[in-house]
Amino acid sequence: MSRVINFSAGPATLPVSVLEEIRDEMMDFKGSGMSLLEHSHRGAEYTEVHETATALVRELFAVPDTHEVLWLQGGASGQFAMVPMNFLGGGVADYVDTGSWSKKAQVAAGFYGKPRYAATGKEGERYVRAPQKLDLSADAKYVHLTSNATIAGVQYHSFPEVLSSGTAAPLVADMSSDMLWRPVDVSKFSLIYAGAQKNLGPAGVTLAIIEKSLMAKGNQELPEMLRYDFIASKGSTHNTPPVFAIYAVGKVLAWVKAQGGAAAMEKRNRAKAEMLYGTIDGNAEFFRCPIEKASRSVMNVVFNLPTPELEKAFLDEGKKNGLVNMKGHRSVGGIRISMYNAMDPENIQTLTAFMKDFAAKNG
Amino acid sequence: MSRVINFSAGPATLPVSVLEEIRDEMMDFKGSGMSLLEHSHRGAEYTEVHETATALVRELFAVPDTHEVLWLQGGASGQFAMVPMNFLGGGVADYVDTGSWSKKAQVAAGFYGKPRYAATGKEGERYVRAPQKLDLSADAKYVHLTSNATIAGVQYHSFPEVLSSGTAAPLVADMSSDMLWRPVDVSKFSLIYAGAQKNLGPAGVTLAIIEKSLMAKGNQELPEMLRYDFIASKGSTHNTPPVFAIYAVGKVLAWVKAQGGAAAMEKRNRAKAEMLYGTIDGNAEFFRCPIEKASRSVMNVVFNLPTPELEKAFLDEGKKNGLVNMKGHRSVGGIRISMYNAMDPENIQTLTAFMKDFAAKNG
């Protein structure tokens, strides 16, 4: 079948050239007479894949020498547990509530200390903003926020000023759904983590960028696998890493670099967002985005149509036109368009043309 | 390059037909217009992949209704922590020491209680047997053993009788390197776990088969991601699973089924072991296997040549003949031939012919 336009929130669409490379290398990786899947994780071939991916992270994120790059398993949910296990020690931590995922992170921390909410983006039943005003504790071990709420469609476009004032606790950010959407000043964060399956590649690996000084303060009374400092000391090959996922993320990062890096991604993503939100706002009676303008996500665009019946018709007709996975998360309903780095701007043109046509016919 | 014969200890050789299927499906999974890597883990396509893989585990291992099948992340090392976190609760557990991996499991358990050794397979500096005589505690929360020690080349061909007497504590087995090498009576085990990258598929997923009654006794004061019962309640899709790894393991399992299942694997593996150990014993002055006959691994065959120089020459000449990754683990040296389920018996014929020839020329 010809390729569809896939707006899935993650796992999500990948660059076609990356998929083609994976396909072409599957039987014989670089003339080694075997697939990369069959290579030892201690061998020269995989070591190069691993180190190249790590170097690309350092380059594309401009990671300073103060920070380490780690490849982990277990997804962001694994980090919800590992962060407090390492750094909470029965103390207080400030969590910012911007949706389901930030809530899950806070709940997990409850087993290791006293996580509290420093702010919420909720208004009534719905998350509508990424809160700027934070009520921080004096003794917080860290502040945790979710940079982009995939379900709610709420994103931080600038992080709260207080966090970069230098007096605040270490800043920990779950960037699973917007990692590398644009350049980020890594030095402002003590820990950034992200499941790969949205903006970075396929599912199966979790990228972390962690400040060495935070890592050094981690709980030492933990099994090796759960200590950031131990994992860093072994270059993330303390045990068998998820070879294929790191290999594929490396290819996506190389693709990002070829496009012009993080700055080019920002340009690309802003252009897509402008097109889509422009279409929504240009037909504001028909397409209704419930998110405050300053917090509207560039990655996951949520909106409603006038009735559930029209939403169903929109999804059905979209599918017939090769526009798939546009249904909002079951907890909020409506429409959700996920358009991570790999989503081609041309596809958003196709989508907005479809939207305008649908609105004209049904408005 | 033409395909080499890859004796890597893991990640390891895979069936060529599996690699071909993965390659052929990479760009368009079953006519869906996208790669499986791009499909939502909640969508119909991945759900079928996930459920098919789970059903194949149940079928090939004849998993009884008393047990659940789980797909986890973090490898066996992750389980070294998760097992005591769930089931030790400050108490005593009996660990059987058959090599580096069982030691790591015991060390990790030390953070959650009092793990002790019920036996060791070590004699002098070397592991030589899978101990049958266990000194069990009366109050152990569980007994933990490693069914096959990948580095030492030591394997349990029959498990200690005391463990199935009905009076013993729950039996937990790390079967990372010999899972599914033959039929196993799952009912004897309360928990079996295995990193996939040896006998089951590529790296990136950990298979667990756990008794429901054990799971129900798990520590509830843990984040969801670390609780077996929670993961089971969500069918291992509590968060995004490692989609590609489960997909590939599913294909390997389908291949095992097509070959005739676990019984056919046993026949195949015994034939390979007979050929290889026969060659070793037939040239016992030249090839020296330090493992007691009853504990010799069918998966990882370790042996020495008369001198380190001859071992180096063996590896070099082997490589020239397309026989690669035969070097023993750096901690023990010598030669190691790993030949998991996917290793074709014909390749062992090629190897033994090479060995005989090498011994004749250099003996």
Image (cartoon, coloured by chain):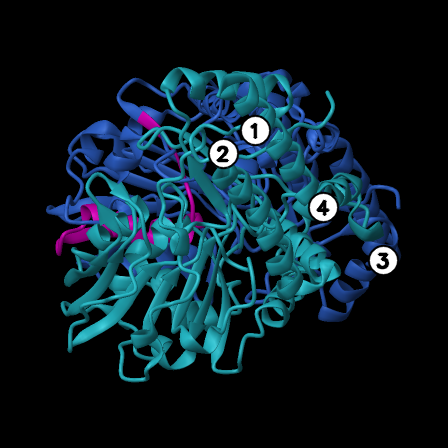
Chain colours: A blue, B cyan
Task: Please report, as a chain letter, where disc 2 is located.
Answer: B
Q: Nearer the viewer, mark 4 or mark 2?
A: 2
In front: A151, or B5? Answer: B5
Return the residue at label 2: B283
Chain letter for mark 1, please.
B
Label 4 close to label 3 by CB (< 8 Å): no
The x, y position of residue A326, in whole percent, is 70, 54
Callout 4 and callout 3 share a chain: no
Is A80 included in the stretch rendered in magenta? yes
User: Amino acid type of disc 2?
Assistant: Asn
Q: Give left or right: position of B129 versus B196.
A: left
Subunit ID for the residue under disc 3: A
Residue at mark 4 to residue at mark 3: CA–CA distance = 37 Å
- x and y, in percent, of residue A63 in the image: 37, 21
> Separation of disc 2 and disc 1 at Cα?
9 Å
Instruction: State the image quarter where residue A342 is shown.
Output: top right
Provide the residue designation for mark 3.
Answer: A317
Can residue B34 be seen here?
A: yes
Q: Amino acid at mark 3?
A: Glu
Q: Secondary structure at mark 1?
A: helix
Q: Which residue is mark 1?
A: B355
Q: Which residue is label 4 attached to? A: B18
- How far across and down, in percent of the image, does residue B351 sit? 61, 32
A233 left or right of B148 in image: left
Labelled pair 2, 1 in contact (Cβ < 8 Å): yes
Decide: marks 2, 3 in contact (CB < 8 A)?
A: no
Front-most of residues B40 and B262: B262
Disc 3 crowd rating (10 Å Cα; few below 14, some 14-19, many 20+) is some
Q: Which residues are magenta?
A: A68-96
